[in-house]
């Protein structure tokens, strides 16, 4: 296979070090160290290599990438080889500290602190350099130590979302397993009834038991020894009882084992959610339904919900599974609490979600101007709310609804880039917002007139999101009281 021309390196491109990209900060500090060791000024070295002092200063500050010819002339003027000029080790302890501080100040963590940048020069005392670099290292250490808190969950979420994005949130192997189960019980078409789901459980060798004393920390309990699945008798639940049962069966069909860490627990949870959705909205009929809607330019999450008798959230999730793979539509999904905090998110369409230094979106505040926030203030809750939003990464059309749960009111939104809106009902909306996020001037900072009047004069009592601060619950199944579960099974297995 011929390598495309645009992937081939130019002869003018400087060489890499052991296959790694050129480290401009280290190179610049090395050039400065060698120049001063020879007693040369910027003007003198510039004259020797054929450039002006201002351009050479940019190289020394790691802000300009020199061409190969310039590197060769610099090496000759400084009396070293190209390899020595590009050496991996800093030339001195001070240079190493300067490089570490420069990298830190250019990183996302330092940017997020909103601190002014320190000008790094020969006049900056060594002890100040030591202190600043040490503070940065300690801050990073403390952040990384939080892996025993919800930080671990956010890291795992970020990693899993990257996999979902890479696969367009479509998992063919789970689709095939779900279809095999449906074929085995003779599913034909239409919504999947509770009767059919009971047949699925029986086919897989499980009996169903509705009880009034299900452990409070569980939605279902599976007794693998006696092949029983216990479900609650209560009708007051945020979860579709069909989904709860299908997720329990999913662990069995997908051959899950006890998770060894939170990341594995989360992957299993997502896989069983996918499996349940693939049964409630089977792939073939759902694709046929969506293709008809696309041909009519009438795609609507509400229609998916109503046609398959599922919740709006399940319909929206299922749309993200199939939209890119089968309709060539890129999309994003967001579940946002009324407080503005994002609880779930997925994207493969380039939309810029807020994220922390780990890349996690969950727990971050959504932009006030996005559909997922504006929808809370809409009076008409019967119809879906549709809106165009201009963002730094492009214009997106989104449709959203709000739903109330025991933990509060949430918005559920599906969005697509402007190029794909032609396939959706609601595209004719004239509502348009403009978002500048992640620029803090968009909605993170109060307007200047309000800040001038009230800064320092207000002391709100915050409604803390304690779940974001508490340690992760211990055990293989976070949040589940295993003693309570085992006692429950002992009581019911007699």
Image (cartoon, rainbow, N blue to C red):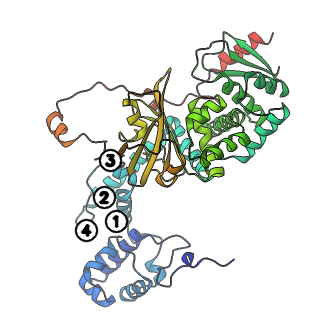
SS state under label 4: loop
SS state under label 3: helix
The quadrant the N terminus occupies is bottom right
**x, y percent for residue 98:** 34, 64
Closer to the chain start, of discs 3 and 1, is 1
Q: Residues within 10 Å of mark 3 (few under 14, many from 20)?
A: few
Which residue matches tag 3? Answer: 113
Decide: is 235 above or below 206: above
**Disc nearest the viewer among 3 and 1:** 3
To which quarter of the image does residue 93 belong? bottom left
Which residue matches tag 4? Answer: 122
Q: Which dot marks residue 94?
A: 1
**Which residue sits at x=77%, y=43%?**
176
User: Gap in Å between the C-alphas at discs 3 and 1?
Assistant: 25 Å
Q: Which dot marks residue 129?
A: 2
User: Gap in Å between the C-alphas at discs 2 and 1?
Assistant: 8 Å
**Disc nearest the viewer among 4 and 3:** 3
Q: Residues within 10 Å of mark 2 (few under 14, many from 20)?
A: some
Q: Which dot marks residue 28?
A: none
**Which residue sits at x=62%, y=14%?**
235
Closer to the chain start, of discs 4 and 3, is 3
Front residue of 168/71: it is 168
The quadrant the C terminus occupies is top right
Closer to the chain start, of discs 1 and 4, is 1
Q: Are marks 4 and 3 in contact (CB under 8 Å)?
A: no
Closer to the chain start, of discs 4 and 2, is 4
Front residue of 159/116: it is 159
């Amino acid at each position: 296979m011929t390598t495309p021309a645009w992937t081939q390196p130019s002869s003018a491109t400087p060489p890499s070090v052991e296959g790694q990209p050129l480290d401009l900060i280290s190179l610049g500090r090395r050039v400065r160290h060698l120049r001063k060791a020879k007693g040369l000024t910027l003007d003198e070295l510039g004259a020797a290599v054929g450039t002006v002092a201002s351009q050479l200063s940019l190289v020394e500050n790691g802000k300009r990438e020199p061409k190969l010819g310039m590197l060769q002339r610099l090496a000759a003027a400084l009396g070293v080889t190209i390899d020595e000029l590009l050496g991996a080790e800093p030339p001195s302890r001070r240079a190493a500290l300067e490089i570490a501080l420069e990298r830190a100040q250019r990183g996302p963590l330092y940017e997020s602190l909103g601190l002014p940048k320190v000008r790094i020069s020969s006049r900056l005392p060594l002890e100040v350099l030591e202190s600043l670099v040490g503070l940065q290292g300690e801050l990073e250490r403390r952040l990384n130590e939080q892996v025993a808190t919800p930080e671990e969950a956010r890291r795992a979420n970020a990693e899993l979302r990257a996999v979902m994005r890479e696969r367009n949130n479509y998992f063919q192997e789970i689709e095939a397993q779900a279809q095999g189960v449906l074929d085995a019980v003779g599913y034909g078409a239409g919504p999947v009834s509770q009767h059919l789901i009971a047949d699925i459980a029986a086919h897989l060798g499980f009996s169903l038991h509705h009880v009034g004393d299900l452990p409070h920390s569980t939605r279902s309990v599976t007794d693998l020894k006696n092949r029983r699945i216990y479900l609650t008798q209560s009708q007051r639940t945020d979860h579709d009882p069909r989904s709860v049962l299908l997720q329990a069966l999913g662990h069995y069909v997908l051959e899950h084992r006890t998770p060894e860490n939170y990341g594995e627990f989360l992957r299993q949870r997502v896989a069983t959610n996918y499996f349940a959705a693939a049964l409630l909205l089977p792939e073939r009929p759902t694709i046929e339904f969506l293709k008809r809607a696309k041909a009519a330019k009438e795609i609507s999450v509400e229609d998916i919900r109503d046609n398959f008798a599922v919740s709006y959230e399940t319909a929206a999730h299922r749309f993200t599974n199939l939209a890119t793979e089968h309709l060539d539509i890129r999309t994003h999904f967001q579940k946002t609490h009324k407080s503005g905090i994002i609880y779930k998110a997925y994207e493969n369409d380039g939309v810029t979600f807020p994220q922390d230094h780990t890349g996690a979106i969950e727990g971050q505040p959504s932009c006030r101007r996005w559909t997922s926030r504006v929808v809370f203030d809409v009076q008409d809750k019967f119809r879906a709310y549709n809106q165009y939003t201009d963002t730094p990464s492009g214009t997106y059309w989104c449709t959203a609804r709000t739903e109330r749960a025991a933990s509060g009111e949430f918005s559920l939104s599906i969005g697509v880039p402007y190029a794909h809106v032609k396939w959706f009902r609601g595209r004719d909306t004239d509502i348009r917002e403009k978002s500048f996020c992640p620029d803090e001037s968009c909605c993170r900072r109060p307007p200047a007139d309000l800040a001038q009047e009230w800064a320092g004069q207000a002391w709100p009592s915050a409604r803390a999101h304690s779940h974001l601060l508490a340690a992760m619950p211990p055990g293989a199944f976070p949040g589940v009281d295993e003693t309570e579960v085992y006692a429950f099974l002992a009581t019911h297995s007699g």
